Amino acid sequence: MGIKAGKIWGTTELVFSNSVLEYHRLEFNKGFSCSEHIHEFKCNGFFVESGVMLIRTWNTNGSVDETILRAGDSTEVLPNIFHQFVGIETGVAFELYWAPFVHDDIVRRTVGVKVK
């Protein structure tokens, strides 16, 4: 695995990275949180292996959603959504970052026709 980086809330370790995906292992501590932040272009997913983690997201209307994740639970945060995780019980989680695939990204210059 990669190099562990210490954080106030625990540690993060890069497991895998390429041009479209990052995969991290988190060890998080009870009573600590990460910063409130956004990712402009990538989704952020969380899968909890052990412990309990709260994922907090801030909606554009000012409301706050809170999702509790226990072992085996996962959630996704879309780009440009402020979010934060909080350790409710000490544990381990996996964090993924990926760029969303845009299904309707085609720009047509012509339309299909029957060729004579």
Image: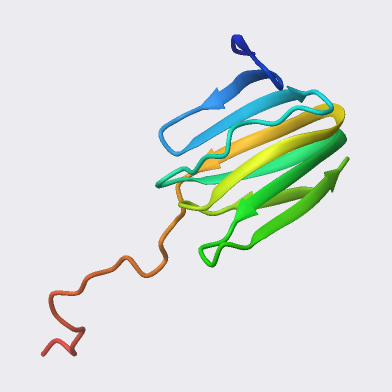
Please state if 69 lies on the left or on the right of 102 as rendered.
right
The front one of 71 and 6 is 6
Q: Quadrant of the C terminus?
A: bottom left
**Figure label count:** 0
* Residue 4: percent from left, percent from top: 63, 11
Q: Position of residue 76 (x, y in %)?
A: 64, 51
Above-or-below relation of 89 to 9: below
- Quarter of the image with the N terminus in it: top right
User: Looking at the rendering, which quadrant does residue 2 occupy?
Assistant: top right
Query: Which image quadrant is residue 31 in?
Result: top right
Q: Residue at x 54, y 67 (%)?
A: 61
- Measuring 75% from the left and 27% from the top, which residue is drawn there? 32
Residue farthest toward the front in the current orientation of the protein = 62
Q: Position of residue 10 (x, y in %)?
A: 72, 18
Instruction: Please name the residue shown 69% across and 38% down the image.
Output: 85
89 horizontally vs 24: left or right: right
Q: Position of residue 111 (x, y in %)?
A: 18, 84
Relative depth, front residue between 114 and 14? 14
Question: Which of the two residues, 48 or 113, is positioned nearer the viewer here?
Answer: 48
Give the residue displayed 76% in from the left and 32% down from the top.
93
- Above or below, 72 relative to 33: below
Please determine whether, in this image, residue 5 is positioned above or below residue 83.
above
Q: Quadrant of residue 66?
A: bottom right
Q: Give the image's coloring scheme.
A: rainbow
